Amino acid sequence: MESQNILIAFLLTLFAGLSTGIGSALAFFTRKTNTKFLSVVLGFSAGVMIYVSFVEIFKKAHEALIAELGEVGGTWVTVSSFFGGMLVIALIDKIIPSFENPHEIYTIEDMDDAEQTRAFRKLYRVGIFTALAIAIHNFPEGLATFIAALQDPTIGIPIAIAIAIHNIPEGVAVSVPIFYATGNRKKAFSYSFLSGLAEPIGALIGYLILFSFFNNIVFGILFASVGGIMVFISLDELLPAAERYGEHHRSIYGLLAGMVVMAISLLLFL
C-alpha cells in the first residue's frame, strides 16, 4: 500500500465524517428543511453506493478471493463476507436504542417544537451513552470509506461524497436532541461535529490493526464486507430517510441519477 494512497484514503474518510458539522450548522442557521433537495441527494447517495457495491466492489473482492482460494471457495467467502457486512451493521442498529440512534431523522423545524423540547431533555441524563452510540454506529462507515479509497481512490472519492451527503442530515439528527438536552447551541454543534470523528478514527484503527497482515484474502473479505455495509446503509437509512421527507419520486430520480453518475465515472477510468 503506497503512503500517498493511505493519506488520500484517510483525508477522504475525514471529509466524509466531519460532514456531520454541515448538517449541524444547517440546523442552527436555516429555519426550513429543503425536503425536495434532501430527498434527491439522499437518493443520489444510495444510488452511488448500491451501484458501486454490486458492480465494482463485489466484483473486485470476488476476483481477489478466487485468485487465492479458487472458484468455489472464493465465491463462498465473497458472498459470506458481503452478507456478513450487512449483519454487522444490522447488529449495531439493533444494539443502539432508537432514541439514541443518530440515524433517527429529525428536521430543522423540530428546533422550534415545544413538545420535542420536553422529550429531548432526557438526553441530558444519557449524554455519554449517546456519544458512544454515535461513535459505534459511525465506526464501520469510516472503515468502509477508508478501505474503498485505499484500494482505488477513483472509487473512494464518489463513495466519500455519498457518505458525506448521508452525514449531513445525520448532523441535524444529532444536534437537535442534544441542543434540547443542554440548551447550548455551541455544545450541540460540537457534539455533532465531533461525532463524525468516529469515521476517521475507525479508519485509523482498522488500518493499524490490518496493516501488518494485509493480503489478498484479508482485502477480499474486507472489500466484500464494505459492499454489504454500504448496501445496508442505502436500504435501511438513506432511502427511508428520503421517504421521511415526503418526496418519494424525487428520491427515486436521485437514486437513478446516482447510479448513472457512478457508472459513467467507472467507465471513464477503464
Image: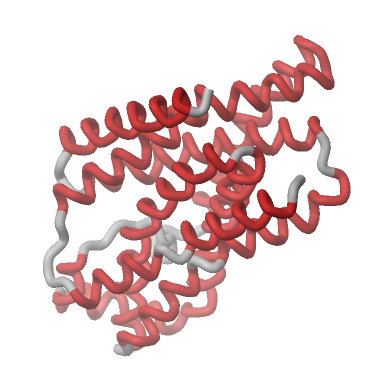
Q: Quadrant of the N terminus?
A: top right
Q: Position of residue 90 (x, y in %)?
A: 53, 43
Q: Is residue 26 left or right of residue 157?
A: left
Q: Is residue 180 left or right of residue 156?
A: left
Q: Determine the residue positioned at 29% across, 73% down.
A: 25
Q: Determine the residue positioned at 59% across, 62% down.
A: 200
Front residue of this view, candidates 193 and 129: 193
Residue 126, compared with residue 170, is above or below; it is below
Front residue of this view, candidates 67 and 98: 67
Q: Determine the residue positioned at 53% across, 37% down.
A: 155
Residue 177, compared with residue 212, is above or below; it is below
Residue 201, compared with residue 189, is above or below; it is above
Q: Is residue 261 left or right of residue 67?
A: left
Looking at this view, name the residue that lies furthest to the top.
71
Q: Is residue 106 left or right of residue 61?
A: left
Front residue of this view, candidates 56 and 201: 56
Q: Position of residue 101 (x, y in %)?
A: 43, 60
Query: Dividing the picture into quarters, in which one does residue 257 lie?
Result: top left
Q: Determine the residue positioned at 15% across, 68% down.
A: 109
Q: Position of residue 185 (x, y in %)?
A: 30, 85
Q: Position of residue 111 (x, y in %)?
A: 20, 75
Instruction: Tell how many labels.
Output: 0
